[in-house]
Each structure stands twice: as C-alpha cells, then as structure tokens.
Amino acid sequence: MKINRETIISLPKTDLHCHLDGGLRASTARDFLREDGEAVPGQLEEKLRVASDNADLEQYLESFELPCRLLQTAGRLERVAYELAEDAAAENIRYLEVRFAPLLHCEQGLTLDQVIESVLTGLEQAEQDYNIDTGLILTGLRQSSPEKTTVLAEKVTEYWNRGVVALDLAGAERGHPAKDHLEAFYVVRNRNINLTVHAGEDFGPESIHQAIHYCGAHRIGHGVRLREDEELLNYVNDHRIPLEICLSSNVQTRAVESYEAHPLPDYLKKGLRVSLNTDNRTVSDTTVTDEYLLAIEKFNFSLRDVRRLIINGFKSAFLSYDKKSEILEEVTLELEEQFFRRDLTVVDEL
C-alpha cells in the first residue's frame, strides 16, 4: 500500500512535544501586529521560521523573540492555544500536549495564574469543538534562576488535574545543567506528577543521564545523542523511558548533521519507545503529518513502522492509566480496521 499524505492524515496520532509560541500562525501574528500599530514585515512567514542553515540551538531559539513579545495578553494566549489545537485536530491528532514557559508571558502585567488559565481556556474550548484531547506542560528555562523554576513547579502542582500534566525544562543545555533546578523537580516528583526534560539535543548523553538519574525525568525531549552511551541507551530501553523525537528541528538546530544521520531508525529497530512530534509547527514549518512523511522518505519506513510510532505516542502520553488504556484500545481498533490485519502485531507491548 502506498503511503501518501492523505493516508497519514487519516491515521489517529499524537503530538507530545509541541511549543505554544513556536506554533503561532503567521496570520494571527499579522493580526496582533496590526492591533499594536506595528508595521507588518513583508516576509512575516519567513521571520517566524527558523533559517534552514541555522548553526545551533541557541540561534534556533532566537526565532521565538517575536512570538513571545506578541503573546502578552490573556486573549492572545487563549486564541493561540485554541488555534494550535485546531491545527492539530485538522490532521487527526487525537492527543496533543502543548508546552510553554509561562514566565515569558508576564512581561506586560499578567500574573502567572492568568497566563496559565488563559492557555487552559483555549485548549478546553478546542476540546469541545474538535475530536481532540489535550494536556498542558509548564516549561522552566535552564538559563533562568532555579528559584523561578521552583515557583513554576508549585504551579504545576496547583493546576495538576486541572489541565496541566507535567513540568518540563528547556533551553540551551551547554553551561546550564538541569541539576541546578533540582528543587523544582523535587517539588513535582514529591506530588507524584510527571516530568519531561529537553536533553541530549545540543549536549551529550551525560545530559540525558542527569535528566533521568538526578531529576527523575519520565520522558526525554529529543535525546538524539543517547546513542553515544550504549549502557544508558539500554537503561532507557529497559525502563521504557520515551524519547520525544522531532526530526525537522533536530536537523535545523544541528543536533544531527542531516536526516540521514538521525538515530531514529536505529532507535526504533532497537525497540526504544520513540514518538514523532513537531517541536514547533511554525518555527520549523512542519506538522506531525510532515514528520511522518519525512521518516518514510528518509528511512524507508513501512506502514508497520508508522503504526508502531503512533502506538508509541499514545503509550508515552501523560495520561492516567485508565484514560490511556481507553484511548489505546480505541486507536488500535481503528488502525486495525482501516489499514492493518489483526496478525500485524507490534512487538513492543510492554
């Protein structure tokens, strides 16, 4: 069976690593600029996207300056959250986890609570309007003070079971070790709440080791450099610690030299629990569908490989066991009925 865009869109999917500000629509940014009385750049779409020849992660992160500056009101945050989920639902994403750094949106008077609640309101409305479930991940920044991350961790516990599903740590890894923020991780772990950490993107496997063994991460964002430490890779595999893979951004940030050099096919072959995600829909100019098509084109993935990645995504979701089981049963049945015979089972059932 030929796998084309329509096929991928028709399949139920997840996006577990998706930044709010990195998904700001160009049309929405244009509206906001006009509201502020600012000139709209002639090449606004290009301004919101990362240059394909960006040299490193820190330059990639510079693409977020305009979105963060524009997203400083409750109404705008609510709108962008809604539109992000709307865009995801349009390509049949059934479960979306949106992450963002709330403290970056308090520069014009909003409180932390107002910022978080605005995004939650947008996501909740999208859930009512579309066939999609969502979760919100609050992100701390490696380069900010540990005290600020601890304040954010307290908000995670406050909004736990109210739409927030985890704490994240992002930002440039070099010179900003995750262990500096141990108090924040402790606050969240002590309340039995989920943790994910960006690690192994622009720094080596020791960053992943620290995220797991010091910070207690339940998932790893990116993790492309895990392959450099076989013992750690085996540990991650044995303990079913999911990796949130984002092909386009991994190449754009030079976390890997090229698509052909990406470890995804090797990870999948070894049995690691890897999922495909956008990272930043606008900044990276991608969708989940595009990421799957890239994997098919670059790695010659089969429909069976696609199915495995999809199931991995749902298994890795920060959902309760009951909810996850319910969605997995529904999705598995749908996949089997539409595209797969019942004897086409997935090896990874642990």
Image (cartoon, rainbow, N blue to C red):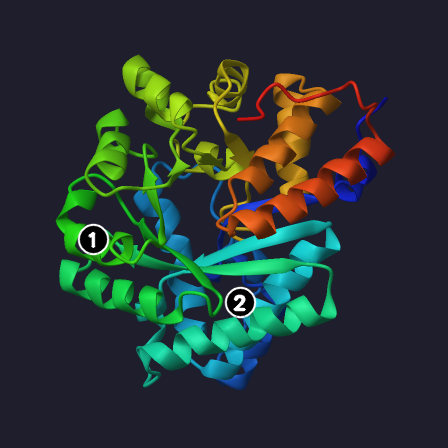
Give coordinates of residue 134: x percent, y percent: 57, 59
The residue at the far front in this view is: 322
**Could you tell whether 14 is left or right of 248 in the image?**
right
Residue at x 27%, y 36% (from the top left corner): 212
Residue at x 81%, y 36% (from the top left corner): 7
SS of the residue under disc 1: helix
Q: State the residue in front, 200 or 202.
A: 200
On residue 186, which mark appears? 1
SS of the residue under disc 2: loop
Indicate the quadrant where residue 132 lies: bottom right
Q: In which quadrant is the N terminus drawn?
A: top right
Which residue corresponds to mark 2?
41
Give coordinates of residue 32: x percent, y percent: 54, 78
- On the question of residue 163 being in view, the answer is yes
Q: State the residue in front, 15 or 284.
A: 15
**Could you tell whether 253 is left or right of 96 in the image?**
left
Q: State the residue in front, 46 or 266.
A: 266
Three-letter amino acid code of the residue under disc 2: Pro
Q: How far apart are marks 1 and 2 (CA)?
A: 44 Å
Three-letter amino acid code of the residue under disc 1: Tyr
Indicate the quadrant where residue 276 lies: top right
